[in-house]
Image (spheres, rainbow, N blue to C red):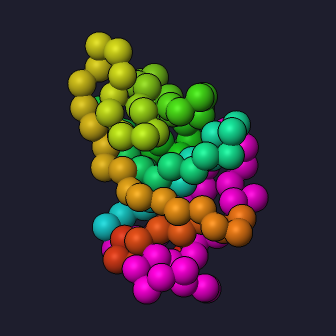
Amino acid sequence: MTNIESRWIDVCAIDAIPLRGCRVVRSPHGDIALFRTAGDEVFALDNRCPHKGGPLSEGIVHERKVTCPLHNWVIGLEDGQATGADKGCVRSFPVRLKGGRVFLDASLATAV
């Protein structure tokens, strides 16, 4: 693992996350879902839908959103907010991309 600063930890290559897909990393705070959009943007959210705790990592990624596989709630990847008539929020985490690698805050995640 290579740190770009002491605060950031290298968790994976961007190519380890499928386009319009997800990869899960473990953290002391629970699983963090790393989502990759069709435009190669990467976002990180808790892997639990705010509605019933469904695994967001198994949802469908579209534009900058993910649809929960359990009850079709649509969650914004940028801020973790439910969209439309649904109300709720999931915790989001800062992500950095550098040299084709994905970095998370070292206090939040450990690479698996």
Residue stretch in magenta: 1-28
Instruction: Tell me the residue at 57%/50% (across/down).
Output: 42
103 is within the stretch colored magenta: no
Q: Quadrant of residue 6?
A: bottom left
Q: Position of residue 110 (x, y in %)?
A: 47, 77
Q: Compare residues 61 and 54 and report the one nearer the observer.
A: 61
Q: Position of residue 47 (x, y in %)?
A: 42, 50
Instruction: Tell me the residue at 46%/39% (across/down).
Output: 77
Residue 37 relative to residue 94: left or right = right
Q: Is residue 2 above or below residue 17?
A: below
Query: Which quadrant of the rendered structure holds the N terminus?
Result: bottom right
Is residue 53 visible from the viewing direction of this image? no
Q: Quadrant of residue 31?
A: bottom left
22 is within the stretch colored magenta: yes
Which residue is situated farthest in the right direction here?
Answer: 15
Instruction: Tell me the residue at 59%/34% (across/down).
Output: 61
Instruction: Tell me the residue at 33%/28% (across/down).
Output: 82
Residue 29 relative to residue 35: left or right = left
